[in-house]
Image (spheres, helix red, strand yellow):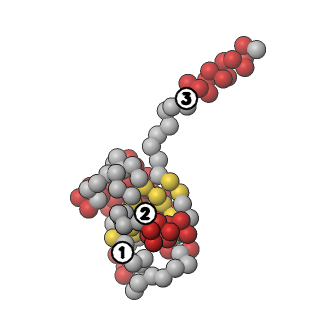
């Protein structure tokens, strides 16, 4: 009985200490947001060369390795909705984690453009 009580206490004691995080969404969910919302940023975390070869309409380019240096200037509202993608999903996760570390509160990551079934611009 004591062991069960201690275990329950341990679980409760740690419950409120979760670090801020980004939300993982699907490409379909991202598209629905883009089609219905007006106030959001669409962030492409790839390189300039990749961006030039094709990107989602309305995206701004900040390569994931430049997020720390450029985000606060180019994305001044830390509460704004930010949708993040890259080529396959790896760099968008890194970029999303970096945005959260910088204090952004509404970051949604939806993977890579290789899985984007909708139109892109070239």
Residue in front for this viewpoint, 65 or 101: 101
Locate residue 81, reporting x and y percent.
39, 58
Q: Residue at x 26, y 56 (%)?
A: 76
Locate residue 6, reporting x and y percent.
66, 18
Spatial separation of the CA atoms under disc 1 and disc 2: 11 Å
The reply, left or right, for residue 77 in relation to residue 2 is left
Secondary element at image label 3? helix
The reply, left or right, for residue 3 in relation to residue 45 is right
Asked if residue 35 shows in the view, the reply is: yes
The answer to whether 15 is drawn above or below residue 33 in the figure is above
Q: Which residue is mark 1?
A: 58
Mark 1 or mark 3, whichever is nearer to me = 1
The answer to whether 100 is drawn above or below residue 35 in the figure is above
Q: Residue furthest top?
A: 2
Secondary element at image label 2? strand
Dot 3 crowding, Cα within 10 Å, few <14, some 14–19, many 20+: few
Q: Residue at x 33, y 66 (%)?
A: 62
Mark closest to the chain's N terminus, 1 or 3:
3
């Amino acid at each position: 009985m004591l062991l069960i009580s201690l275990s329950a206490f341990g679980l409760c004691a740690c419950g409120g200490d979760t670090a801020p995080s980004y939300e993982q969404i699907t490409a379909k969910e991202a598209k629905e947001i883009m089609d219905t919302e007006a106030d959001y940023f669409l962030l492409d975390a790839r390189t300039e060369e990749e961006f030039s070869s094709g990107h989602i309409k309305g995206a701004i380019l900040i390569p994931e390795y430049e997020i720390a240096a450029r985000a606060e200037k180019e994305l001044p509202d830390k509460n704004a909705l930010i949708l993040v993608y890259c080529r396959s999903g790896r760099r968008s996760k890194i970029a999303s984690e970096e945005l959260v570390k910088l204090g952004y509160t509404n970051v949604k990551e939806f993977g890579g453009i290789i899985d984007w079934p909708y139109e892109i611009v070239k």
